[in-house]
């Protein structure tokens, strides 16, 4: 007798019916139970700090979508592999910037940044110790599609202060605790587990770097301004998590770090503590501005100069135009064959806005500005060095006049805007539960945040009814789980 087909495959890729099946399972849950699930998810989120502070400092609940996204083991392994390849390529940008004038034009730095890089980078450009990165890749991937490999596209990298390290595992835990048991009443073999906790990913990066420096102690400072308003304050939660694992860890404002006898120190509750490694949330452009205003930043300077900071100076290259370096033929020799393969498969064509001739997506030479006007609907514009989804303009969603004005602005401000080939986000139906417990479906655009170390991969899921998906743009959080 033939076995019944199931969308709950073990291990590898997923069948394209899984998302639909999960929605169908939720629709089998009685309305009164769904109302209770919705309430519990909301209350758990508020109790555990899954909130977004508005600009006035008031905490607002961050929506948590009720259905998880699910991937298989083969998919998780492939995403981990390409993240590691991409990160290795990104680490090369620092030296390439120092050695190649063309790369410097594509990866422009402010005078403040250039000054600090020159002072802290050392004669060989590497500072003390190997380059090390911890960041978040923003990407899309449609796990349920037969073309999921082709759908996997990287949009940008956040190599400093990667957000979501607390939110991702917390949302996963909430969904596993509340929603998944209700689903398993109707599908007992639906066995789901968390992917790697991004905080453990960070801890592995820090520990590996400590070993490379042959440190005999492991005291860690998570370095971020205190008393910030707006956004999600994750560092205090992460300090508590590290301490629960037995790691000596402190939340330190960069203005509080001090150097004494060649060693970093911080003070908490009147007690001085030596610091061995600093995970930093700050770009040197911001730090340099603080220093010019008279703030003593000798501590964070010391950490960067001596290789005690994660990310290292290589983390200053947060430019979207890095993807132009990856996709332009003249830089091909700087990268391995494997890196170039990943670029071709998973990096969209990207160019700085400029009045010039360049290679188009098919490799042929184009007059860039004229070509951008003629191919607006297949492109998007975004600030070269911004975050939070701010300023992104989709050609298909704007007028020809607005598109032309945006291009003109980019030409007048060299190095500040990029154009990128439009890649569709994974669009998924998610259940929406009304106050009576009735289930409807709404289409959401979804993106992934990927955190990688040598052994681990953490995933942050986000969804929005808008094409620009970001919590700061009023999006929601989506649990991303792995199928056993």
Image (tube, rainbow, N blue to C red):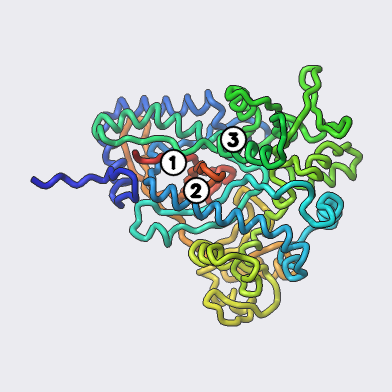
In the image, is 28 to the left or to the right of 84? left
- Tell me if residue 398 can be seen: no
Q: Are marks 1 and 3 in contact (CB under 8 Å)?
A: no
Q: Earlier in the sequence, mark 3 or mark 2?
A: 3
The quadrant where residue 323 appears: bottom right
Q: Residue at x 86, y 33 (%)?
A: 259
413 over 300 or under it: above or below: below
Q: Nearer the viewer, mark 3 or mark 2?
A: 2
Mark 2 crowdedness (10 Å alpha carbons): few <14, some 14-19, many ≥20: many
Instruction: Tell me which label, 1 or 2, sits earlier in the chain.
Output: 2
Please report the residue visible at 55 percent of the width from the left and 46 percent of the height from the top.
470
Disc 3 versus disc 2: distance between alpha carbons? 19 Å
* Circle 3 residue: 52
**Relative image position of residue 228 (x, y in whole percent):** 71, 34
Q: Which mark is residue 448?
A: 2
Q: 309 left or right of 134?
A: right
Q: Which mark is residue 384?
A: none
Q: Secondary structure at mark 1?
A: strand
Distance Cα–Cα, label 1 vs label 2? 9 Å
Q: Observer-nearest residue: 336 or 155?
A: 336
Q: Is residue 2 visible?
A: yes
Single out the mark in the foreground, 1 or 3: 1
Horizontally, residue 19 falls left or right of residue 299, namely left
Q: CA distance from mark 1 to mark 3?
A: 20 Å
Contact, mark 1 vs mark 2 (Cβ under 8 Å): yes
Q: Residue at x 71, y 49 (%)?
A: 130
Q: Quadrant of the C terminus?
A: top left
Residue at the spot of label 1: 480
Q: Which residue is at 42% across, 26% downward?
A: 39
């Amino acid at each position: 007798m033939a076995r019944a087909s199931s969308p709950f495959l073990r291990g590898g890729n997923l069948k394209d019916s899984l998302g639909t099946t999960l929605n169908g399972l939720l629709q089998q849950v009685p309305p009164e139970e769904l109302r209770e699930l919705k309430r519990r998810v909301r209350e758990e989120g508020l109790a555990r700090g899954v909130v977004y502070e508005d600009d006035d400092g008031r905490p607002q609940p961050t929506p948590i979508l009720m259905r998880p996204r699910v991937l298989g083991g083969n998919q998780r392994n492939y995403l981990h592999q390409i993240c590691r390849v991409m990160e290795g390529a990104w680490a090369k940008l620092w030296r390439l910037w120092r050695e190649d004038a063309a790369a410097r034009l594509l990866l422009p730095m402010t005078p403040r940044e250039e000054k600090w890089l020159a002072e802290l980078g050392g004669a060989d450009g590497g500072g003390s110790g190997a380059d090390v990165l911890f960041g978040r890749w923003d990407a899309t991937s449609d796990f349920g599609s037969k073309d999921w490999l082709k759908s996997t596209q990287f949009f940008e990298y956040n190599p400093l202060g990667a957000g979501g390290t607390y939110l991702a595992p917390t949302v996963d835990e909430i969904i596993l605790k509340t929603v998944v048991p209700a689903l398993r009443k109707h599908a007992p073999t639906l066995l789901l587990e968390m992917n790697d906790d991004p905080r453990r990913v960070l801890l592995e990066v820090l520990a590996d770097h400590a070993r490379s420096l042959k440190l005999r102690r492991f005291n860690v400072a998570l370095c971020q301004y205190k008393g910030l308003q707006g956004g999600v304050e994750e560092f205090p939660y992460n300090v508590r998590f590290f301490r629960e694992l037995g790691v000596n860890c402190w939340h330190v404002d960069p203005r509080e770090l001090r150097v004494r006898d060649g060693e970093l120190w911080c003070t908490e509750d009147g007690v001085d503590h030596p610091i061995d490694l600093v995970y930093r949330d700050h770009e040197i452009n911001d730090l340099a501005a603080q220093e010019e205003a008279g703030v003593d930043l000798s501590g964070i300077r010391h950490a960067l100069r001596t290789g005690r900071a994660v990310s290292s100076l290589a983390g200053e290259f947060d430019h979207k135009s890095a993807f132009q370096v990856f996709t332009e033929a003249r830089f091909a020799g700087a990268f391995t064959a494997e890196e170039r393969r990943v670029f071709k498969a998973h990096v969209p064509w990207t160019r700085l806005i400029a009045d010039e001739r360049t290679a188009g997506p098919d490799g042929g030479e184009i007059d860039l500005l004229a070509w951008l006007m003629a191919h607006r609907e297949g492109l998007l514009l975004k600030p070269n060095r911004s975050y939070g989804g701010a300023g992104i303009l989709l050609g298909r969603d704007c007028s020809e006049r607005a598109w032309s004005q945006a291009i003109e602005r980019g030409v007048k401000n060299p190095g500040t805007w990029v154009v990128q080939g439009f890649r569709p986000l994974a669009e998924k139906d998610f259940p929406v539960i009304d106050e009576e417990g009735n289930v409807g479906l709404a289409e959401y655009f979804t993106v992934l945040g990927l955190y990688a170390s040598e052994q681990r991969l953490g995933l942050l899921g986000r969804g929005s009814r808008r094409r620009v998906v970001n919590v700061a743009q009023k999006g929601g959080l989506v649990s991303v789980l792995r199928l056993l």
